[in-house]
Image (tube, coloured by chain):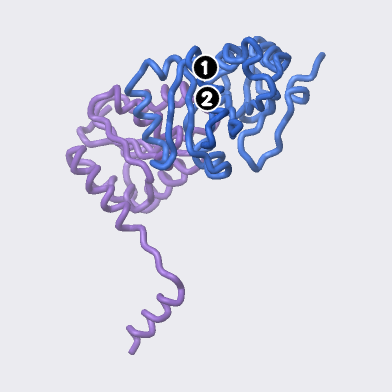
Amino acid sequence: MPIALFRVDERLIHGQVVVGWGKHLGVDRIAVIDDEVVASPWERDLYCLGVPSEVGVVFASVQDARHELAVWRADPRRIIVLVRDVETLARLAQHQLLDHEEINLGGIHFAPGRERLLPYLFLSPEECERLREVARSGAVITARDLPGTRPVTLDDLLPEE
Amino acid sequence: MSDGQIRGLVVAHGSVAPALVAAVRQISGCEEGALQAISNDGRGPDQLLETVREAAGEGPVLVFTDLSSGSCAFTARKVAAQRPATAVLSGVNLPLLLDFVFHRDLPLHPLVDRLVAKGRGEINGACIEEMVRADRALSR
């Protein structure tokens, strides 16, 4: 089963993911790929508190996820995969690991150095370039906060100057 | 600033928090410091965390959130995990907030138990037909 949603979202597990996408896609599991959260048992517990009991949660470091991705894709259960930032996505995408994978940019908020591209998406020039690299490695990237909104392609998001 | 009473923070999506706090003030006439509204609008996880931490200040705090699965609840739990005398209550509604402002002098744990019971007890449902039937039965 292909990954139901592969999302970049600073908030990781939160309402839009659990309610907006989770109900829409009928997911069985949510995978969080994040080195920091993996190393923090209490943060993992906090994230699990926000997930309905019928939905499983797995946590993986970037290194482990590079192996787990194939397992998740082969699993019949429907899964949402979450990373918090473009850097984590870019590390996962090395060696064409995300070739043909559809990547959803779901929520990156304002921070110094970032510019607003969409109401829910702020990116720095470095992050824009990293996304272009990920796209060149074969991933198909669109921005979309919720299932009911219009997806914006990376070409529309980051037109070549 | 602390008068020894528990302060409430309502941390919720969009305009939910300011609307709830405005309604509580309108109905109860409670002092401004009793309850503060924080919206997640336009705030990333780090900004929201910092805002809630700052608002919590010193003294006992009860953080009310809307969705138990949302980023507001996650942030509130993160603050509570690292701060003493902090409780989190999800699924906030107007009746329990009104009860809160009149019982801020209770200890934190019994207060949370009381408010959870109050909030749940105020959720009732009935189909129109049943209500009409009940009204007719009462008028006989």
Measure the C-alpha gap from mark 1 to mark 2. 7 Å
- Colour assignment, chain B: purple
Q: Residue tagged by mark 1?
A: A67
Q: Is residue A38 left or right of residue B88?
A: right
Residue at (42%, 79%) from the top-left corner? Answer: B132
| Identity, as a three-letter code, of the amino acid under mark 1 | His
Could you say where residue B28 lies in the image, as x and y percent from the top left? 33, 51
| Identity, as a three-letter code, of the amino acid under mark 2 | Val
Is residue B5 or residue B74 the one in the foreground?
A: B74
Is residue B38 or residue A6 the one in the foreground?
A: A6
**Image quadrant for the N terminus of chain A?**
top right
Farthest bottom residue? Answer: B140
Is residue A21 or residue B4 the one in the foreground?
A: A21
Residue at (39%, 64%) from the top-left corner? Answer: B125
Contact? badges 1 and 2 (CB < 8 Å)? yes
Residue at (44%, 41%) from the top-left corner? Answer: B17
